[in-house]
Image (cartoon, rainbow, N blue to C red):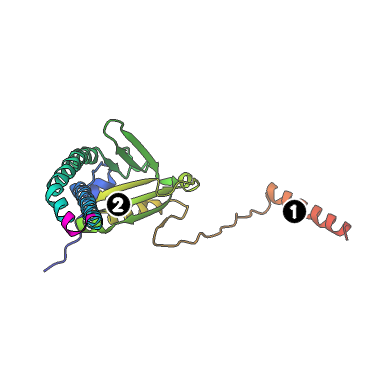
């Protein structure tokens, strides 16, 4: 039984060809699950707080009366308000995530390598991050991401690193092949002379001295300057 390679979706050929791809539908499902969990946690916190407060103020008899009188109305009001916020939020995230597009190469090909990100519903933002400006690239997968089998690639650039803002300049989120995408971008970055790093490796830049060519005008000027320096040093003694 032969071993099969890891399947990359979209295929690596599409990624290297500059074709655009979108976040996985799992990213939308993750956002929906997080919203539902937040609503349930708030509900449990409110219920426990109200029950505890009623028990401390009125004691067991008043506590029972409070539960009989207010339990159903409180739950109805809470879930009516919560669903009125949750359902539009889920619809919004569905539309928003469908508006996201990524590309790791310019459509013109290798001549203009860059990372392209498009986001937004009413106001669309299109951002181009040239490879030559990238200083750091890392992949990240939180608890919910691992549950859904997705992750994100975080991009930092030289201009953004010098600012006081926290976090990466750009994120490619909700991708099932995020590790392959990170490795591909890192491979492209290493074609440049400047050392590039991921968030898990350390690269030490190598000091390269400028080559000296003897017999040139620059070499003669350098020799004259050294003679002047030695002469001034001897006069100062």
Q: Is residue 209 left or right of residue 148?
A: right
Q: Is residue 139 left or right of residue 193?
A: left
Q: Is residue 185 above or below residue 128?
A: below
Q: What range of the chain is rendered magenta?
A: 58-62
Distance, label 2 to label 1, CA atoms, is 56 Å
Asked if the residue at tag 1 contacts the one at tag 2, i.e. Cβ–Cβ closer than 8 Å, the answer is no
- Mark 2 lies on a secondary structure that is strand
Few, some or many C-alpha atoms within 10 Å of disc 2 (few <14, some 14-19, many ≥20)?
many
Q: Is residue 57 left or right of residue 209?
A: left
Which residue is under mark 2?
152
- Mark 1 lies on a secondary structure that is helix
Query: At 70% from the left edge and 47% from the top edge, which residue is drawn?
Result: 217
Residue sitting nearer the eye, 51 or 147? 51
Query: At 50% from the left edge and 47% from the top edge, which residue is drawn?
Result: 162
Estimate the x, y position of residue 188 in percent, counting from the top left: 37, 51
Q: Is 22 one of the magenta-colored residues?
A: no
User: Is residue 18 in view?
Assistant: no
The quadrant of the picture occupied by the C terminus is: bottom right
Q: Quadrant of residue 180?
A: bottom left
The quadrant of the picture occupied by the N terminus is: bottom left
Estimate the x, y position of residue 230 in percent, counting from the top left: 81, 57
Query: At 29% from the left edge and 38% from the top edge, which residue is drawn?
Result: 119
Few, some or many C-alpha atoms within 10 Å of disc 1 (few <14, some 14-19, many ≥20)?
few
Which residue is under mark 1?
223
Estimate the x, y position of residue 159 in percent, counting from the top left: 48, 44
């Amino acid at each position: 039984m032969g071993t099969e390679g890891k399947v990359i979706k979209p295929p690596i050929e599409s990624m290297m060809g500059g074709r655009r791809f979108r976040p996985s539908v799992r990213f939308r499902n993750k956002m929906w699950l997080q919203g539902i969990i937040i609503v349930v946690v708030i509900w449990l916190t409110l219920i426990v707080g109200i029950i505890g407060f009623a028990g401390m103020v009125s004691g067991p008899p008043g506590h029972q009366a409070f539960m009989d009188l207010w339990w159903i109305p409180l739950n109805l009001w809470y879930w009516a308000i919560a669903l009125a916020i949750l359902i539009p939020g889920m619809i919004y995230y569905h539309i928003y995530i469908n508006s996201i597009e990524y590309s790791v190469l310019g459509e013109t090909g290798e001549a203009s390598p860059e990372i392209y990100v498009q986001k937004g519903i009413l106001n669309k933002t299109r951002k181009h991050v040239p490879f030559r400006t990238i200083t750091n690239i890392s992949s990240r997968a939180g608890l919910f991401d691992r549950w859904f089998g997705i992750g994100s690639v975080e991009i930092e650039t030289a201009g953004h690193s010098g600012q006081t803002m926290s976090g990466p300049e750009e994120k490619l989120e909700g991708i099932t092949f995020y590790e392959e995408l990170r490795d591909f971008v890192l491979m492209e970055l290493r074609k440049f002379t400047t050392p590039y790093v991921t968030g898990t490796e350390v690269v030490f830049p190598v000091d390269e001295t400028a080559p000296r060519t003897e017999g040139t005008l620059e070499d003669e000027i350098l020799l004259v300057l050294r003679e002047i320096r030695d002469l001034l040093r001897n006069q100062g003694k």
